[in-house]
Image (cartoon, grey):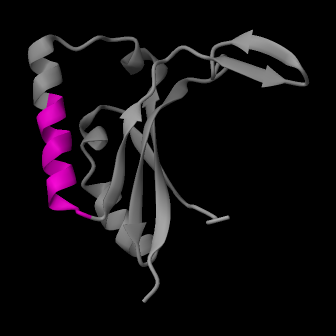
């Protein structure tokens, strides 16, 4: 069976992204991510978090903020190898980001160009 790659896109409410965890909370969160990675060897790249700042370009105009008119923000990503969407969803459902209130995960298959 051919393995495909899937991108897990993490979204959090903008208000949640503005809160900074204490060092102790951050250690606990990172431990959860490490355990998730150990449980699912199909995670090719655990990815990284994204800062809530950024810039966008539309029609040649640069604006500050990646989601200036949104109530949620893309907060990070991971890449998973799986046979199909169902297998990728098993990994996504166990992701620690879902412990955060209002967080969600969008699962997208990579085109493989």
Query: Residue at the spot x=42%, y=78% of the render?
Result: 83
**Relative to 58, 52 lies left or right:** left
Q: Front-most of 59 and 93? A: 59
> Does 59 appear above or below 111?
above
- Residue 39 horizontal/vertical position (percent): 15, 59
For the stretch drawn in magenta, the main secondary structure is helix
Query: 53 or 69, which is in the foreground?
Result: 53
The image quarter in which residue 40 lies = bottom left
Residue furthest out toward the right: 59
Which residue is painted at 19% across and 51% down in the image?
A: 36
Q: Quadrant of residue 27?
A: top left
Relative height, residue 111 to residue 72 (above, below): below
Q: Is residue 37 magenta?
A: yes
What residue is at 16 percent from the left and 43 percent from the top? 34
**In the image: residue 63, left or right of residue 102:** right
Q: Residue 43 in the image: x percent, y percent?
A: 31, 58
Q: Nearer the viewer, residue 27 or 101?
A: 27
Which residue appears at 43% of the width and 16% of the height?
Answer: 15
Q: Residue furthest front?
A: 113
| Quarter containing the N terminus | bottom left
Residue 48 point in image, percent of width and height: 38, 34
Q: Within the magenta stretch, is there residue 50?
A: no
Quadrant for the C terminus, please.
bottom right
The residues colored magenta run 29-41
């Amino acid at each position: 069976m051919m393995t495909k790659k899937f991108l897990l896109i993490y979204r959090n409410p903008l208000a949640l992204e503005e809160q900074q965890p204490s060092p102790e909370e951050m250690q606990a969160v990172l431990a959860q991510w490490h355990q998730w990675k150990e449980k699912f060897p199909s995670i090719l790249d655990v990815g990284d978090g994204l800062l809530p700042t950024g810039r966008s370009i539309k029609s040649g105009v640069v604006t500050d903020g990646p989601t200036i008119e949104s109530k949620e923000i893309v907060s990070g990503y991971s890449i998973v190898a799986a046979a199909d969407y169902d297998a990728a969803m098993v990994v996504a459902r166990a992701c620690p980001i879902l412990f955060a209130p209002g967080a969600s995960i969008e699962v997208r298959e990579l085109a493989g160009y």
